[in-house]
Amino acid sequence: MTAISMAKQKLRMSLYLPDELKAKVEKLAEMESRTISNYIESLCREAVGLAIKEGRLNEDDE
């Protein structure tokens, strides 16, 4: 799967962050050689994984 077709399968969202938080997220993303978007996606995946592990979400919840 190419990067172009992969991007078409993802939902585009707007995110509003205070300047100070945005700067910190940018720095963390840079430290992991990720884009801000990719870094935030990884944080969301971690949060969902933890919620599933803790029983707050089911694997098949959408």
Image: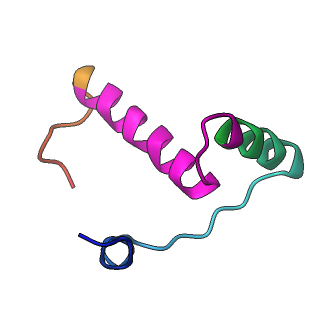
Percent across and percent down for residue 53 are 24, 22
Q: Nearer the viewer, residue 24 or 51?
A: 24
Q: Which residue sits at x=79%, y=42%? A: 21
31 relative position to 21: left or right: left
Indicate the quadrant where residue 3 lies.
bottom left
Q: Position of residue 4 (x, y in %)?
A: 38, 78
Q: Is residue 50 above or below residue 1?
A: above
Q: Is residue 11 magenta?
A: no
What color scheme is it?
A: rainbow
Can you say which quadrant of the picture contains the N terminus?
bottom left
Residue extending furthest toward the top: 54
Q: Position of residue 55 (x, y in %)?
A: 22, 24
Residue 37 on the magenta span: yes
Q: What residue is drawn where x is 87% and y is 51%?
A: 19
* 26 or 13: nearer the viewer: 26
Q: How many marks?
A: 0
Q: Is residue 48 above or below residue 19?
A: above
Residue 11, percent from left and from top: 40, 72
Say whether residue 44 is left or right of residue 34. left
Residue at the far right: name it. 20
Q: Residue at x 53, y 70 (%)?
A: 13
SS assignment for the magenta stretch, majority: helix
Magenta segment, which residues?
Answer: 30-52
- Taking 59 as reference, is 49 left or right? right
Q: Determine the residue located farthest toward the left in the rendered image.
A: 60
Residue placed most toward the observer, 45 or 8: 8
In the rendered image, the quadrant that contains the C terminus is bottom left
